[in-house]
Image (tube, grey):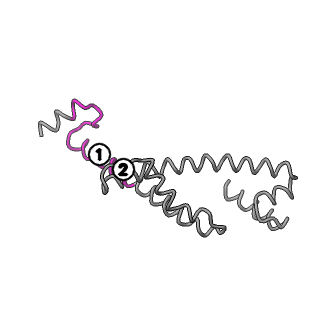
Amino acid sequence: MTYMSLITLCYSSRRCGGSSYGEVVRSAFGERMEEGVSWLLFIFLLFVIAAYMVLIRDIWTPLVGLVMGEVDGDRMLMGIIVVLLPFLFQRSLHALRWNCYIGFGSILVLCVALCRGGFQRYYYQEHYGDDGQNGDEVDEATTAA
């Protein structure tokens, strides 16, 4: 569905000569719809940015904490925002590649951590026959071994 939407958007842009969402919507549906689409994009992007910030903070704070000791998550997020801020005010979309690299790195770290946790749980089940959910059984199994 997303691919079809992009094709339709590019076709409409070429046909009506618009270079932004607003221009394409204005030429196709009128000024009121352009304002509606602008508000819809603003609200959508607001939630996307909030989710991105939560993801960045929750992934990078423990990793930096391993290297530097205890780190405040809010200060960590503020540091990342300050580092990315010059790239976010560029007029060219090419500057957003740095933002994408940080996001890709965060997802990569998250996937590695999830796989590591899964392998640890699998290893524990193979050797102790328990899923590790009950704290009492874990203590008994580790003390017996």
Residue drawn at point x = 86 percent, y = 58 percent: 27
The location of residue 93, given as percent across then percent down, is 63, 67
Residue that lies at the very extreme toward the left in this rendered image: 144
Which residue is disc 2 drawn over?
71
Residue drawn at point x = 76 percent, y = 50 percent: 37
Q: How far apart are marks 2 and 1 (CA)?
A: 31 Å
Q: How crowded is mark 1: few (under 14 residues within 10 Å), some or many (20 or more)?
A: some
The location of residue 42, given as percent across then percent down, is 69, 49
Three-letter code, disc 1 = Tyr
The relative height of residue 84 versus residue 138 in the rendered view (above or below) is below
In the image, is 5 to the left or to the right of 122?
A: right
Which of the 4 image quadrants contains residue 63? bottom left
Which one is in front, 136 or 38? 38
Which one is in front, 44 or 124? 44
Per the rendered image, the range of residues in magenta is 112-138
Q: Is residue 127 magenta?
A: yes
Q: Marks 2 and 1: which is nearer the front?
A: 2
